[in-house]
Image (cartoon, grey):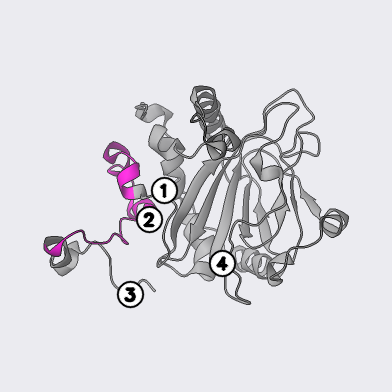
């Protein structure tokens, strides 16, 4: 259910200053080599609070589908936050995302999936298993990337310190669990940081040993010719998408829609649902 937000309580990232080109190049180098890069202070404290409070409410409202194991496993990974709160969709308006992702996925990249990743007190979530976020492997070619906004401090105690195996994105076979644990790096950071990584890099969360929740927002992004997890254009209410800037609408999939009939297929060039030259 979409909860209308007063404009005063909406975050605004569409006018956020661009990153210096030298910094963009540094992040691109880290992603191509070790597989990830971390940007502290990407969101401000007020933005973090608005997103975190909304996420906690969504978790409390969630009811697993009876008899569907995946629904139970994903109870701390909410898939419809962009439908519920425009502030999550506002994250997609940030021009810095285009700077960070386009060097790897091309300028027309889109959003594959969008979920929370919350770790309950003294517990874990489904992301605690050793895994990658993209099954496709082709040396030197990135199909998917992950983007995480940390909404709590990532510490070694609260489970939010993602464990990653740097460089594992270059190998098609998974590491043995003991090899992963021996060589993995704990990524700790403060709330408001952004983590961007190659979705073929092996990683996992781990147990939250504190009495407090640990929250983050994640999206998986892909190349423009790939299918998305959801038909986001139809899934997200028009009352939200109509308020977004062109970049956010492109990421949601408005430039890569398929015509449903000949009337849509023969629309004038300016009204085409699938925009040309997108890979």
Mark 1 vs mark 3, CA separation in Å: 25 Å
Disc sitting over residue 21 in the figure? 4
Name the N-terminal-most of marks 1 and 3: 1
Q: CA distance from mark 4 to mark 1?
A: 18 Å
Residue appearing at x 65%, y 38% in the figure? 191
Q: Earlier in the sequence, mark 1 or mark 2?
A: 1
Label 3: few (<14), some (14–19) or many (≥20) C-alpha neighbours in 10 Å: few
Magenta residues span 233-262
* Image depth: mark 4 or mark 1 in front: 1
Residue 266: image location, x then y, percent = 13, 68
Q: Which mark is residue 14?
A: 1
Give the Cα distance between marks 1 and 2. 9 Å
In this figure, which residue is indicated by the disc labeled 3?
277
Q: Which quarter of the figure is the C terminus placed in? A: bottom left
What's the mark number on residue 247?
2
- Distance, label 3 to label 4, CA atoms, is 25 Å
Single out the mark in the foreground, 1 or 2: 2
Tell me which label, 3 or 4, sits earlier in the chain.
4
Disc 2 residue crowd, few under 14, some 14–19, many 20+, Cα 10 Å: many
- Categorize mark 4 by other alpha carbons within 10 Å: few (<14), some (14-19), many (20+): few
Q: Are marks 1 and 2 in contact (CB under 8 Å)?
A: yes
């Amino acid at each position: 259910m979409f909860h209308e937000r007063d404009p005063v309580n909406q975050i605004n990232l569409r006018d956020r200053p661009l990153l210096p080109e030298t910094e963009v190049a540094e992040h691109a180098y880290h992603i191509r080599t070790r597989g990830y890069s971390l940007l502290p202070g990407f969101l401000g404290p007020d933005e973090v609070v608005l997103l975190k409070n909304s996420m906690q409410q969504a978790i409390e409202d969630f009811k697993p589908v009876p008899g569907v194991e995946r629904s139970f496993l994903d109870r701390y990974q909410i898939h419809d936050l962009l439908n519920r709160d425009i502030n999550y969709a506002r994250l997609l308006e940030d021009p810095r995302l285009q700077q960070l992702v386009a060097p790897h996925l091309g300028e027309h990249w889109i959003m594959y999936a969008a979920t929370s990743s919350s770790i309950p007190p003294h517990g874990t979530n489904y992301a605690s298993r050793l895994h990658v976020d993209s099954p496709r492997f082709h040396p030197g070619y990135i199909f998917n990337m992950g983007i995480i906004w940390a909404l709590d401090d990532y510490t070694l105690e609260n489970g939010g310190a993602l464990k990653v195996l740097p460089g594992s994105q270059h190998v098609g076979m998974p590491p043995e669990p003991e090899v992963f644990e021996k060589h993995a790096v704990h990524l700790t950071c403060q709330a408001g940081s952004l983590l961007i990584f190659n979705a073929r890099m092996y990683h996992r969360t781990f147990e939250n040993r504190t009495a407090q929740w640990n929250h983050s927002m994640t999206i998986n992004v892909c190349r423009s010719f790939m299918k998305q997890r959801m038909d986001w254009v139809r899934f997200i209410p028009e009352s939200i998408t109509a308020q977004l800037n062109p970049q956010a609408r492109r990421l949601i999939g408005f430039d890569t829609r398929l015509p449903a009939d000949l009337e849509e297929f023969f629309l004038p060039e300016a009204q085409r649902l699938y925009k040309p030259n997108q890979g």
